[in-house]
Amino acid sequence: MFLSRPLFFLALFALLGELILSPEIPFSYRFLLLFFLVFLSLFLLQQKKNRLLFCSLLCLTLFMLNFYSVNHRYGAERENIGYILPLQAVLRGKVLYIEEQEKKWKIILGSCIADTALEKKNSSLQKKEKYQKRNDLHFQKLILYLPKESAGDDSMPHLLPGQICSVKGHFLELNPATNEGEFSLPSYYKGEGISGVFQAKTIGHILGEPSPFAKELFTLKQRLGNRIDALFLEETAAFLKSLFLGERSGMTLSEKSLYQSAGISHILAISGLHLSLLGEFFYRLLRKAKLSSLLSSLITSFFLFSYFLFTGSSHSAFRALFMLFLRFAAIQLGKGKDLLSQLSFALLFLLWLNPLSLYSIGMQCSFFTLFVFFLLEERPGKTVRKKKEKVLSKICKKYTLGFSKHPSLLLKFPSYLSKLIPCLLSTLPHRLQGNFLFYLALLPLFSLTQFSFPLYAPLLNLLLLPLLPFFFLLGAVSILLSYLPKQDYLLLRLLSTSSRFFVNRLFQLFHLLMEKSLALPFSRIPLGKMQVLSVILYFLVLYLLFFFPKTKTFFSKRMSFFFGPMNCFSEQKNLFFKALEGRLLRPCLCRVYRTFLSLLLSLGFLLSLPLYLPKPPKDLEIAALDVGQGDGFVLRKGNLVFTIDNGSTSKNLFPEQIFFPYCKAKRIQHIDYALLTHCDRDHISGIQALLEKNPSISLSHLILPASSLQDHRYDLLKRLAYNHGADIFYWQKGDELVFSEQGICLPTKVNAMAENSTIAENSTMAENHATTKKGWPYAKDHQLHIRCFYPNDSSYMEEANAHSIGCLLEYGHFRMLFTGDMPKEAEEALLENCREAEVSPVVDVLKLAHHGSKTSSCPSFLSETQAKFALFSYGKKNRYGHPHKNTVENCQKYRLFPLETAKLGEILIKTNGEQFEITAPQA
């Protein structure tokens, strides 16, 4: 079906060429892409499409050279930023786009030059290589953050699009994603073609005249934004500014999260959906005004191009704009409407202009969604579906025109319904199947971007998307009427008030439907982050079952016994049975059989979905998250999830940006045990946020140090755990947990240490303080043991670090020691407790206490533990100086190999109880 569309093959070869050269893709996957490219070439050669093959290979070569050139230049620009990152610099560039944010202006600069000599050049140094690496560095596109106080006016900057500005400041470091599920800002900026971010302190010279057209667009945008703020409530105004102007800075984080959780976040972005709606409405409006097709196309194209520049020029908007241009051109040339060829041409054009748009999430989602939609149109049975849709459209058009011209035809309304309803019923099955397949095809996209699927998103889109034109219309009417003198015109005042009233009510309806959908059971189905091979297998099976033309024929031949009795009738000479078979039985049985087969395939595919999703690890898996300045460990074995600490002080949004996304990516919905070594924020902030505001992840048991029984610093955690429904355990020397191979907690002897704890004024709660006695049972292989060796008792300690829980993990022959922020005295006490219990302190991996501080990790402790690896958990450039030089030297002295989260990112330890391996997946 694609052989008749040469543009599709040209775009496919260009895309494959860029993917093969992409350094971010592992070599093994690039080899698979190369194999697929060779397969396509052989297929075209077999089909004797020699001219198409030659053009495709030529396109492949040109696009690969273009991508290599642009990617090499981008890499050199990123390397140059690394040279001058800690230095002050003067940046000059041309203003391309300006966006207002809460406390600063976000400005896109093009054709930039950075100079760290601060405009004081020494001619004797200009020839030196070191000088040339730091001065007059060129960048294609940068983001400039300009504080509003530096701009001189809170409401309007002195800069305008088209001008050349000079600012003094420094580049900001862009940290890549170092944990599973974490958002990668450098990858996002690479997809936009942005090399770096520059933080301005002062603004210098402004040269040149602004572009008149861009200036008018920017001024109009500012005025419209101020007008929307004045007309509507704060939340409604933020939504309308996002819908009309493409500005989402006014929306709160919770508001954005609500749209994303409901599965309709595409409404907030100026995407192809918005441009398509506006384009269709504007074009039809001009045609209704009796303008020619050519003039209507030209005016609509100019309007859409202006709106495209007006809203920030996103990739999905460019795709829609270019496809609309192609459609208008096809209308004028009298050509057919081949949407797949238009999509392929738009992809070719975009990849040639900006090859790095390959990394853009918006571009990937936009093109993939439309390709799936067009593929659905080409699935088997297209001729029958088109015939039914044509009959339905003829009936609707005929009676609509008849009713408008002859009102007396309303008497024939029953006959109209008698023809319309059977047509609707005949087209309904394939429409439902199309929607079902559409969201099945989008499932991996949701898995890779959101790690879950909003089950009611199809219904929400069906209900809310038709309301978008009313939002546009009522919002435009409200804004337009606000500029008219309506003091003396009651009708204008009434119309203005009613339009704003309906906009507010529509916005409330949006929120109500989203909140109700999220309150329903199974509102979000956890998918986790699918592996690349699972995604490939998923699409292969999906295509073979529902899109491959010979699939149903194959199953029909294997199930021919359904039609076996019919062959007996056909052999008979009896005309009655022959007529009965040809006109009644066979068509009915065929229709029933096809429906049954479709349902059977759909049900079988749905039941096989868990095979493609990430599975719990069979053996023990320990993830040391890169939390910045803090500690965070997630232990998984089968369905068991055991966390130790998880907090950060250097990353304020650690729970929302690191911890929760990691749990979603791993399909963690329930945490069995959460152990908090002590009450410092860099150890508890993630678990505290989970207990406060994340109902999607449940917690069964919270483990605290025994000294927290009388420590008011733990009162908030106790109250949150009680409200969450989690049991609280207080650990001291001698307590342990033992888990079977399946991750089930085995029964142990319980110490009678349970009492009521007052956590707030006039409020008490009963807590479960279940601990275990000393006396370790025999450690069987593949049983997970977590044993506490410190603190010694429940006595109160003022210093929080001094009562940190020190626990030993054993899994078969693998041993790892967790120490929290224990000082040297606590480490010595831990060793003494090990001697009393006759347990060897020798371990394979040692988590160094207090992030490698000089107050911990004393030489005697390192000597007795005899660890092979020392795990440092700290943040880059932290103000505490972690890890301390003495601690690093001691580790080198005792031959501990360092594992540093600040350098490696997330560190993953996998063990089967006999051997273990350590990897850094994001390094």
Image (tube, rainbow, N blue to C red):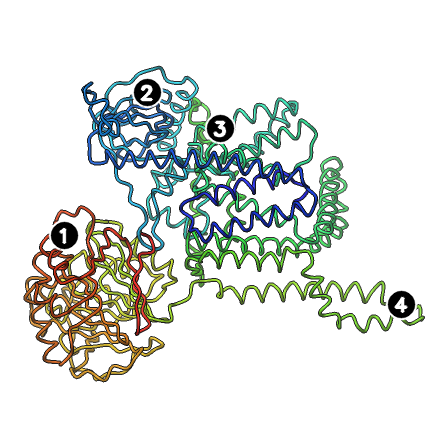
Q: Earlier in the sequence, mark 3 or mark 2?
A: 2
Identify the residue at image location x=26%, y=54%: 626
- Mark 2, residue position: 164
Q: CA distance from mark 1 to mark 3?
A: 70 Å
Q: CA distance from mark 4 to mark 3?
A: 73 Å
Q: CA distance from mark 2 to mark 4?
A: 85 Å
Q: Which amino acid, mark 1? A: His
- Mark 4, residue position: 578
Q: Earlier in the sequence, mark 4 or mark 3?
A: 3
- Mark 1, residue position: 882
242 vs 442, left or right, is left
* Number of other residues with Cα within 10 Å of mark 2, as a class: few under 14, some 14 to 19, many 20 or more: many
Instruction: Check if mark 4's residue and mark 3's residue have beta carbons within 8 Å.
Output: no
Question: Which of the 4 quarters of the picture holds residue 147?
Answer: top left
Identify the residue at image location x=22%, y=68%: 844
Q: Earlier in the sequence, mark 4 or mark 1?
A: 4
Q: CA distance from mark 3 to mark 2?
A: 48 Å
**649 versus 584 height, above or below:** above
**475 versus 635 height, above or below:** above
Q: Which amino acid, mark 4? A: Lys
Pinpoint residue 62: horizontal percent, then vertical percent. 52, 34
Name the foreground residue: 701 vs 277: 701
Q: CA distance from mark 2 to mark 1?
A: 43 Å
Question: Which mark lies nearer to you, 1 or 3?
Answer: 1
- Mark 3, residue position: 491
Q: Which amino acid, mark 3? A: Leu
Kind of element beneath mark 3 = helix
Instruction: Check if mark 3's residue and mark 2's residue have beta carbons within 8 Å.
Output: no
